Image (cartoon, helix red, strand yellow):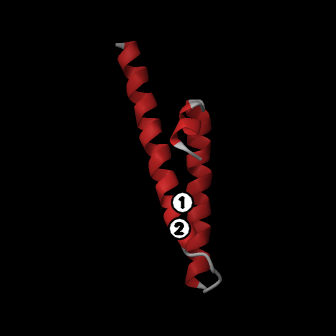
Amino acid sequence: MTAKEIRDLSAEEVETNLRSTREQLLQLRLRKQTGQVEKTHEMRVMRKSIARLETIKNEKARAGSATAA
């Protein structure tokens, strides 16, 4: 997902995607340990996706707290 697509999501959807991506990364790490992963670049892609999701989640949280204040 691109940052623009993530920004269009609601805060709950961002959190859901973040959880699922983290779980996928965990599964990929476990498969890598057993030697079942052929595309190791997927780990880097997932880590970057998690970073994007976290960044936008924090942006939304700051925007929400700024409007509340």
At a point 47% along the width and 46% down the height, the residue shown is 52
Question: Is residue 14 or residue 8 the one in the foreground?
Answer: 8
Q: Is residue 27 left or right of residue 48?
A: right
The amino acid marked with disc number 2 is: Met
Q: Is residue 69 above or below residue 40?
A: above
Q: Residue furthest bottom?
A: 35
At a point 55% along the width and 57% down the height, the residue shown is 22
Residue 38 placement (x, y as % from top left):
63, 80
Corner quadrant of residue 59: top left
Cα–Cα span, label 2 and label 1: 5 Å
Tag 2 residue: 43
SS at mark 2 in the image:
helix
Residue 46 bears which disc, if any? 1
Residue 37 placement (x, y as % from top left):
62, 79
The amino acid marked with disc number 1 is: Met
SS at mark 1 in the image:
helix
Say which quadrant the C terminus sits in.
Answer: top left
Q: Is residue 54 left or right of residue 39?
A: left
At a point 60% along the width and 32% down the height, the residue shown is 9
Q: Is residue 61 left or right of residue 33?
A: left
Residue 6 placement (x, y as % from top left):
56, 38
Residue 66 placement (x, y as % from top left):
36, 18
At a point 42% along the width and 42% down the height, the residue shown is 55
Q: Is residue 5 above or below residue 65?
A: below
Q: Is residue 24 above or below residue 56?
A: below
